[in-house]
Image (cartoon, rainbow, N blue to C red):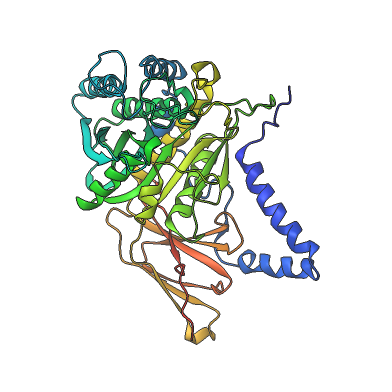
């Protein structure tokens, strides 16, 4: 049985940089071009960043992540599987079978966590009568998400972490609502991770963090991202600012069909554009993983999702929110959407590592100040256009700010400049050839996402 090398996330980052360098060097004049490109940031001000991206470990958050339990994840997923089918159109009356019984159990578990933390979680059913557009008869179905809110000091800013609890045997019949559809990996694994994160965060942070966290267990994913689309529309209609929307979908398998194993890496998908907010959230996840769980490699994938596939992060991305998807490295399509998606093929030690990566990202972002929302950049005339003036408005709760710089071809930020409490900075790097970003730093050292400049837009003349 072939086993993949157990290499940490920094190896993936180094591989990206080596590959870029090799590609440049192999082209005519490549060595000279590679040297010149590296000079864009190598001679810049500030300090060079490693794979942690300037993030630092917070002891309280690190302690909370150790509380994530593979045994509890197994119990949760096993209970979901025991409902037989969780098809969105399945039985809603039975106490033991179907999606109705599943959502009532999830609601009960989250309500129990709320009671244990003195009411710190606000648990609700989030229903919507929606048309199943993919069905030939276009029936209306009550699609019900289960949500647990951990209010922050700022209730207008929200981080959403979700997984879908509906299942199907879609590879046989997408609308078969009676046959067994265990959905242990797709997506009992992701739902279990979200439910466990709600338990851990309510236990360790009962008074919340700076931003509000929504632990969302969606319905209707298999019939067209119905539950997540409803929630995204609801949150936007109610005026919330979405800091991040993340989905755990298919996060439990570690063995490929040929016997290859990989329990030490996870794919994280973040869509174009490269200077956009979803890609920036992916970079943050990557750095959070290196900071809090360096033995578990983040494999960044610079696209919205797998080829011809979709997930519950997409409705948020389509509304302009930072959104990413977490999915196991070794997907096995021979088991997905079939009765063979069973508990035997879910590795709960692996699911716990995915949940810790989620938790590191959620905790760091929720504790940080808001991202600067007004960063602008203009060419500096006095330097003949070689320098650029960055400006931004003061961010509530920020103790200081940092300017980040990377080449346009670099997968991660390469340098950081600490600028103190100033809200303007004259950057020596030529931004025709690079990107810059501005992020806020809180009193405890938590860092926001970076506001990237120049924006991903061009003016022709």
- Of residues 410 and 424, the one nearer the viewer is 410
x, y percent for residue 261:
65, 26
Quarter holding residue 52: top right
- Quarter that holds the N terminus: top right
- Of residues 114 and 228, the one nearer the viewer is 228
Q: Is residue 239 visible?
A: no
User: Who's the residue at 24% across and 50% down the image?
Assistant: 240
Q: How many marks?
A: 0
Residue 119, compared with residue 379, is above or below; it is above
User: Who's the residue at 27% across and 56% down the image?
Assistant: 396
Q: Is residue 428 visible?
A: yes
x, y percent for residue 291:
52, 40
- Name the side, left or right, on which 327 lies relative to 179: right
User: Who's the residue at 40% across and 42% down the image?
Assistant: 246
- Of residues 254 and 449, the one nearer the viewer is 254
- Name the side, left or right, on which 416 lies relative to 371: right
- Name the side, left or right, on which 258 lies relative to 90: right
- Of residues 411 and 74, the one nearer the viewer is 74
User: Who's the residue at 74% across and 59% down the image?
Assistant: 23
- Name the side, left or right, on which 442 lies relative to 9: left
Residue 246, compared with residue 32, is above or below; it is above
Q: Residue furthest front?
A: 137
x, y percent for residue 328:
54, 33
């Amino acid at each position: 049985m072939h086993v993949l090398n157990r290499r940490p996330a920094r190896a993936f980052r180094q591989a990206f940089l080596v590959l870029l360098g090799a590609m440049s060097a192999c082209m005519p004049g490549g060595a000279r071009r590679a040297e010149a490109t590296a000079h864009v940031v190598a001679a810049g001000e500030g300090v060079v960043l490693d794979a942690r991206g300037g993030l630092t470990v917070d002891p309280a958050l690190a302690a909370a992540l150790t509380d994530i339990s593979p045994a509890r994840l197994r119990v949760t997923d096993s209970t979901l599987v025991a409902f037989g089918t969780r098809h969105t159109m399945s039985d809603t009356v039975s106490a033991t079978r179907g999606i109705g019984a599943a959502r009532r159990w999830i609601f009960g578990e989250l309500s129990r966590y709320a009671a244990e933390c003195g009411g710190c979680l606000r648990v609700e059913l989030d229903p919507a009568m929606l048309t199943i557009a993919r069905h030939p008869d276009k029936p209306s179905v009550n699609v019900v998400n289960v949500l647990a809110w951990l209010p922050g000091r700022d209730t207008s800013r929200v981080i959403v972490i979700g997984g879908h609890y509906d299942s199907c045997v879609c590879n046989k019949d997408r609308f078969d609502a009676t046959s067994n559809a265990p959905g242990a990996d797709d997506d009992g694994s992701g739902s279990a991770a979200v439910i466990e994160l709600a338990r851990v965060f309510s236990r360790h942070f009962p008074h919340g963090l700076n931003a509000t966290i929504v632990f969302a267990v969606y319905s209707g994913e298999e019939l067209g991202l119905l539950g997540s689309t409803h929630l995204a529309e609801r949150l936007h209609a109610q005026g919330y600012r979405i800091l991040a929307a993340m989905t755990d979908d298919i996060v439990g398998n570690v063995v490929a069909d040929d016997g290859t194993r990989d329990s030490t890496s996870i794919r994280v998908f973040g869509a174009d554009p490269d200077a956009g907010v979803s890609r920036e959230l992916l970079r943050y996840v990557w750095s959070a993983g290196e900071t809090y769980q360096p033995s578990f490699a983040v494999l960044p994938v610079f696209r919205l999702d797998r080829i011809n596939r979709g997930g519950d992060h997409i409705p948020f991305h389509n509304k302009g929110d930072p959104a990413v998807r977490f999915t196991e490295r070794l997907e096995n399509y021979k088991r997905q959407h079939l009765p063979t998606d069973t508990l035997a093929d879910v590795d709960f030690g692996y699911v716990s590592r995915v949940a810790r990566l989620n938790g590191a990202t959620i905790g760091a972002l929720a504790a940080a100040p808001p991202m600067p929302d007004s960063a602008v950049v203009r060419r500096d005339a006095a330097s003949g256009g070689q320098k650029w003036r960055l400006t931004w408005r003061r961010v509530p709760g920020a103790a200081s700010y940092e300017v980040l710089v990377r080449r346009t071809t670099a997968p991660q930020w390469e340098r950081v400049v600490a600028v103190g409490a100033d809200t303007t900075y004259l950057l020596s790097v030529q931004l025709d050839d690079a990107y810059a970003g501005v992020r806020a730093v809180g009193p405890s050292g938590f860092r926001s996402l970076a506001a990237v400049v120049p924006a991903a837009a061009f003016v022709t003349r």
